Image: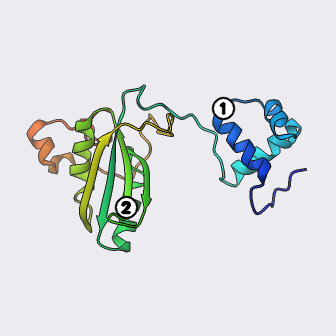
Amino acid sequence: MYNKKRKALDEVDYKLIAELQRNGRTSLVALGRKVGLCHSSVRERILAMIREDIIRVQANVNLRKIGYYAAFVGLEVVNTRAAVEALKKLESCPRVLLLGACSGDYNVFMILVAKEFDSLRAFIERNIRPLPGVRRVSISFGDIVWPQFVPYPLMIKESSCTPDCSNCDVFKELYTCEGCPLSSASTR
């Protein structure tokens, strides 16, 4: 039986992960043949990795095929505390595909996703630039070329955001905003 208390991944685990990344629908029997185990041992290993939050089985989407674009954003934030607060505020945002801390010119990075560049631009101007402690913002708009499939939730995920459209100059002028998917006046 597979050791559920193991401390590190072994070569078989890495092979299983690689095979699942190539084709997540590969049968347990086929996986077992590729790594030299019976299907029940493969199942135990996969379940253990799922339980330990090492892997997750999910449906990833091809953003280019469904017409979504990306904004690659770097933030220079004044200090670690402000960076942590920015990360906390943005981690549940429906536009955020990827979020992290880094070193160099910028100490927070993110990839934002939307159907239109204008939606991304409006979101950045309204929700990213005003974050406390943000000194500089670097933005590049484009497509995610690789990996072809990414874990972007197409339904609006739960968010701690509470948009206040009545105080937004863009909304006051145009009476519509594509910047925030939580706004009652916006669309995805």
- Type of amino acid at the residue the image marks with label 2: Val
Q: Is residue 178 visible?
A: no
Q: Nearer the viewer, residue 171 or 110?
A: 110
- Type of amino acid at the residue the image marks with label 1: Asn
Q: Position of residue 18 (x, y in %)?
A: 68, 42
Q: Nearer the viewer, residue 103 or 75?
A: 103
Residue at point 27%, 55% (across, down) = 138
Q: CA distance from mark 2 to mark 1?
A: 32 Å
Label 2, secondary structure: give it.
strand
Residue at point 72%, 30% (across, down) = 26
Q: Quadrant of residue 129?
A: bottom left
Q: Give the residue furthest to the top.
A: 65
Query: N-terminal of the two: label 2 or label 1?
Result: 1
Q: Position of residue 2 (x, y in %)?
A: 86, 51
- Which residue was labeled with disc 2? 108
Q: Quadrant of residue 114?
A: top left
